[in-house]
Image (cartoon, helix red, strand yellow):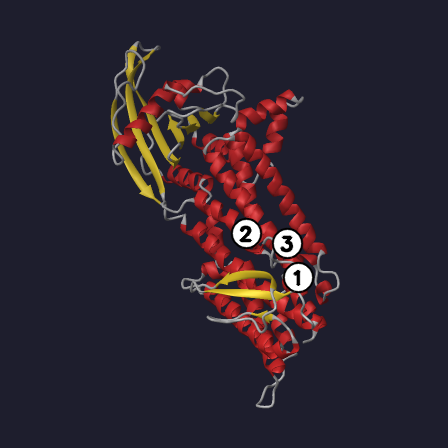
Amino acid sequence: MNKEFVSTVYNYLGNLNFGLLPKLIKSKQTPTNNNSTATDISWNKFLQSLIALSNAEQAYYKFTYLSTKNSNLQDIYGVILNDLRIISNINSKFNSNQGTAVAAGGKGATAGTSTPTKDKMTITSPTGNSTPLSMSSDDQNPEHSFFVALILQTCIILQVRIDMIGVYSAILSSINNSDVSLENIGNSLELIPVIYKDKITHPLLLQIKSNTNYEISILRNLLRVQILLSKHIFKDCILLLFQSKIELDSWREMDQGGSSGSRSNSSSNDNRWASNHIHQWLFLFYNSLLSKSTLFFHFPLKNVEEEIGGNGQSFREISQKNSPDYISIIENFCVKTNALFFGVIRDCQETVYSSIGYSFIDNQVQTGLKAFPLLFYYPMDPKQSPMQHMPNIIGLILENRKSPTVITTPSNSGSGGSSSNSNASSTNANVTDIYYYLDTRKVRDPQRSTFVDEYLSYFISKVDPHLFLCLIFKEVRKQKDQSINDFLKLLTNSLKNIDIFSILSQKDQNK
């Protein structure tokens, strides 16, 4: 086998340069016939597997398999894995008379000699069959040992790919299936590195291993942030976001400078980087979570900015760099539609809650109005307390839980001297529930000394079981108001990261 050529191929794979690989590999293939040796046969099979691997890796890194209705990329990786096992087994048998003690294969495969093995691992195929792969500590042929170790450790990488395809598929399915738990997906990412952590040592696989390390670590941390944000845990969110940003930057820097010695140097860094859709998607995921944390922890972050010498304006300049900039989006919509109030409300009933997201002492369980804190609200008018709206909002949230299709009138929907009636219902579209409530009350007109009708239109959207968005208008706004419904649906889906997860399945003409 041509060691230098194989090194070039794996360098391409490690640097995500897949486009030229099939043609390059085919140029090294030779026809086989009845006179071909086992080495010739296994070499050609190995090259065929490398072509299939290059195509599979390109689909994996560009997420094209997620935009295909009947994706079989896991099966493709499984076929490559089994083919590499067979190649390893052929070489082991061919070299067994020379004292080489490397064996791998299907059911019932045994080592070529009785030499004790130094390292033994098990590779599980997609069909569930486990095959022991073992390597001798006294292999007498260094080049043969080099290639067999490469093949066996490549099999481990393939198993990791099969598992990660399952992870991304589960993330995508979580959009429409509430039974899919992001927390369980995150837990599975704790286990996958166990497959390869100490088993990938071959020099030609270190770049691929490094890419995989970054991918799994960043995705695991971002899923943790998503879960911690839903629990309003500030400190761990910020630390994990900071760690994720460092790893995202390090991965890109490594990718841009990691192809020295390969023929891909003729390509620009930007072209090479365009292959890594995984990093691009993870960066979008990171930006989304950073924006969410700025919204959910708006007041504690603003306080920190003021404590270190800044002010509201300097904090605003920082938050405007977020993508998306939720605060600007909310403010612009409220100004455009003349909204009376917008609020992000968290339901903390019977749970411990701290307004700053952490506490060094045990807080008491929240009750009453304190059990529904405002994480963010607009307008921030010091002359007008947002708490005046909270009794009605809380009543609507609680009543909706009792009756998921109809929101009934709160027991006390107005101040003293007023009366109320309601017209309430619920709509459900695009996985977003928007609850509508029209409150009509009689209020005294100070100029005419008479009572006039005053209207308050409530729109409440549920982001998750403990997080709600509320819009209030001091006028009659129709339940099916297109602009209001579209705004709440887009904002809710964004806060759920549905828009980010949906990118995984988008068909791209550049893929």
Residue lying at the far bottom of the rendered structure: 34
- Amino acid, disc 2: Val
- The residue lying at 72 percent from left, 55 percent from top is 257
The quadrant in which the N terminus is found is bottom right
The quadrant in which the C terminus is found is bottom right
Q: Say whether residue 52 is left or right of residue 175.
A: right
- The residue lying at 60 percent from left, 73 percent from top is 22
- Pointer 3 or 2: first along the chain: 2
- The residue lying at 57 percent from left, 34 percent from top is 238
- Amino acid, disc 3: Ser
Question: Which residue corresponds to mark 3?
Answer: 210
Residue 236 vertical position relative to residue 186 in the rendered view, above or below: above
3D distance between C-alphas at marks 3 and 1: 12 Å
Category of crowding for the residue at label 3, using alpha-carbon neighbours closer than 10 angstroms: few (below 14), some (14–19), many (at least 20)? some
Q: Secondary structure at mark 3?
A: helix
- What count of labels does the image hold? 3
Q: Say whether residue 48 is left or right of residue 385.
A: right
Q: Secondary structure at mark 1?
A: loop
Q: Position of residue 296 (x, y in %)?
A: 50, 31
Residue lying at the far right of the rendered structure: 261
Question: Which residue corresponds to mark 1?
Answer: 202
Q: Secondary structure at mark 2?
A: helix
Q: Are marks 3 and 1 in contact (CB under 8 Å)?
A: no
Q: Position of residue 282 (x, y in %)?
A: 56, 48
For the residue pair 81 and 398, the one nearer the viewer reads as 81
Classify residue 127 by image quadrant.
bottom left
Question: Which residue corresponds to mark 2?
Answer: 194
Q: Say whether residue 11 is left or right of residue 377.
A: right
3D distance between C-alphas at marks 3 and 2: 15 Å
